[in-house]
Image (cartoon, rainbow, N blue to C red):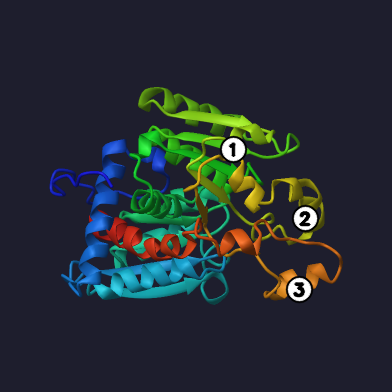
Amino acid sequence: MAVKKDLRVIDLKGRSFLTLLDYTPDEIRYLLDYAHELKANRRRGIFNNILKGKNIVIIFEKSSTRTRCAFEVACLEEGGHVTHLDISTSHIGMKESIEDTAKVLGRFYNGIQFRGYEQKVVEDLAKYSGVPVWNGLTDTDHPTQILADLMTIEEHCKKPLNKVKVVFCGDIRNNMSYAWMYGCAKMGMHYVAYGPKEMKVDEKVLKTAKEVAKKTGGKIEICHTDDCLKGADVIYTDIWASMGEEDKIRERVELLTPYRVTMDVLKKTENPIVLFLHCLPSFHDFETGMAKEWIEKGVDIREVTDEVFRSKHSVVFDEAENRLHTIKAIIAATI
């Protein structure tokens, strides 16, 4: 783990958290150090009411487990209050524009979380609300997840982040792959997107990440052969069909099965202490309704084997817990 800096040096008050591209490496380092400190405090039973008198609203267009729970617990543990809204029980986007919604919520709340489809929505909330807005996930980015992932790597890997190689296996043009490109570029890390040629990475995203990486000493690569696995410190994957893409499952399985994370994949890293990370939820066995439904049709939708998921290499539940500590750091630092 990096040596902790003086947490008073960097002031993020009033800032939104829409993408890691908006933050400098030092600012990201500050948030990570703050999250480590908050986690240590929580384990000692220390809570400082740093959000006393603060109110946040969390808006969900897409369903959520970790993101919703992390925002609610993070705020409540530090003395704040939380309102949950979803599209079906509010006027957002139907009877009321995003601009008008933002202006109203900005009068009531100290901060707004949004989890949904379009990046433009979270950007407009930030533009018009006048309070910090936090991106809980969009179709093109997932910055709060990457912060938790970086924290988890620091806890389990002895290397500094700028010496770490991350290989993302599978759907290399989904929001997690793009978010990882931005995170690795910002922190000077080596990122490899390992997936099929048929999946074309957005050229603008790739260009932006490579430009940032040039300044930080990072490296961003796209690879379609398994030789890129050698030397990886982290193997990462995500489910093969994101929310709203369930109709594409069969074609995705045909395309991505060669990139399923197996023990063979971990062995090809030639790293006996390689880490396995996953943002969750994961199809790693057949104990979920969806996995059962598809295997009965002869389709195996698992992006990772159960053997890997439950192995000594897997730190997915530490990673899930760290959503809480990193989100708490983001809320506290910005409001």
Q: Earlier in the sequence, mark 2 or mark 1?
A: 1
Residue at (31%, 44%) from the top-left corner? 28
Residue at (46%, 72%) from the top-left corner? 85
Neighbor class of circle 2 (other Cα within 10 Å; few <14, some 14-19, many 20+) is few
Secondary structure type for disc 2: helix
Which residue is at the front of the view, 126 or 144? 144
> Where does the image place residue 188, in percent across and percent down from the top left?
39, 32
Which residue is at the front of the view, 178 or 222? 222
Q: Earlier in the sequence, mark 3 or mark 1?
A: 1
Viewer-nearest of discs 2 and 1: 1
Secondary structure type for disc 3: helix
Using the numbered discs, state the Cα–Cα distance from disc 3 to disc 1 in whole angstroms: 30 Å
Residue 54 falls left or right of residue 326:
left
Neighbor class of circle 3 (other Cα within 10 Å; few <14, some 14-19, many 20+) is some
Residue 335 shows in the view: no
Extreme-right residue of the structure = 297
**Residue pointed to by mark 1:** 229
- Image quadrant of residue 45? bottom left
> Which label was assigned to residue 292?
3
- Image quadrant of residue 19? top left
Residue 272 falls left or right of residue 214:
right
Identified by mark 3, the residue type is Lys
